[in-house]
């Protein structure tokens, strides 16, 4: 199928598909005229890539996970599980950092509010 057909079937933009190829997430075969051609199974692959992006994973991490779907095995599954666990831990750390930053901003807002309330109307 052509790139526009894949984009329509998977509900993504043509630009996204080109990006996926640049990142090594998706491959195509070129026609003699240079057009990208995809297999029907690539619809499912693109949908999986979308789900992984929605889970906050980077393209580098997704590249690490995709072999599990291509050559399923206990070892590949264990590697994918560990990689996703690492990403979850990274995200949890980022959330904690954002929470500390938000709490510091809340303290600054409270101090500003107290300062404003202490000002004499002028």
Image (spheres, helix red, strand yellow):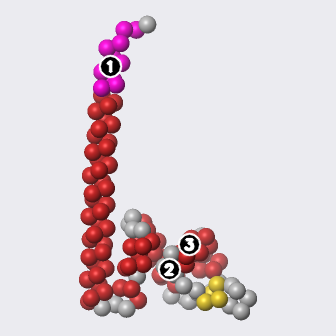
CA gap between label 1 and label 3 equals: 50 Å
Residue at the (32%, 49%) spot, across then down: 98
Using a 10 Å C-alpha cutoff, classify the residue at mark 1 as few (fewer than 14 neighbours), some (14 to 19) or many (20 or more).
few
Q: Quadrant of residue 122?
A: top left
Which numbered tag is attached to residue 115? 1
Q: Secondary structure at mark 3?
A: helix
Using the image, determine if residue 73 lies above or below residue 11.
below
Q: Secondary structure at mark 1?
A: helix
Q: Secondary structure at mark 2?
A: loop
CA gap between label 1 and label 2 equals: 54 Å
Quadrant of the snapshot with the N terminus: bottom right
The image position of residue 16, as x and y in percent, is 57, 71
Using a 10 Å C-alpha cutoff, classify the residue at mark 3 as few (fewer than 14 neighbours), some (14 to 19) or many (20 or more).
some
Sooner in the amino-acid sequence: mark 1 or mark 3? 3
Residue at the (59%, 80%) spot, across then down: 6
Q: What main secondary structure does the magenta stretch of the protein show?
A: helix
CA gap between label 3 and label 2 equals: 9 Å
Question: Which residue is situated farthest in the right direction here?
Answer: 33
Report the span colored magenta: 111-121
Residue 10 shows in the view:
no
In the drawing, does residue 55 fall left or right of residue 8?
Answer: left
Using the image, determine if residue 53 lies above or below residue 42.
above
């Amino acid at each position: 199928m052509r790139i526009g057909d894949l984009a329509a079937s998977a509900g993504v933009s043509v630009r996204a598909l080109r990006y996926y190829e640049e990142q090594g997430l998706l491959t195509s075969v070129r026609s003699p005229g240079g057009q990208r051609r995809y297999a029907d199974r690539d619809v499912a692959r693109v949908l999986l890539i979308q789900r992984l992006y929605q889970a906050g994973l980077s393209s580098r991490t997704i590249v690490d996970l995709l072999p599990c779907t291509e050559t399923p095995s206990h070892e590949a599954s264990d590697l994918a599980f560990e990689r996703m666990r690492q990403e979850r831990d990274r995200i949890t750390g980022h959330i904690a950092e954002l929470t500390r930053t938000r709490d510091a901003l809340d303290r600054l807002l409270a101090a500003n509010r107290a300062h404003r309330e202490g000002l004499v109307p002028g």
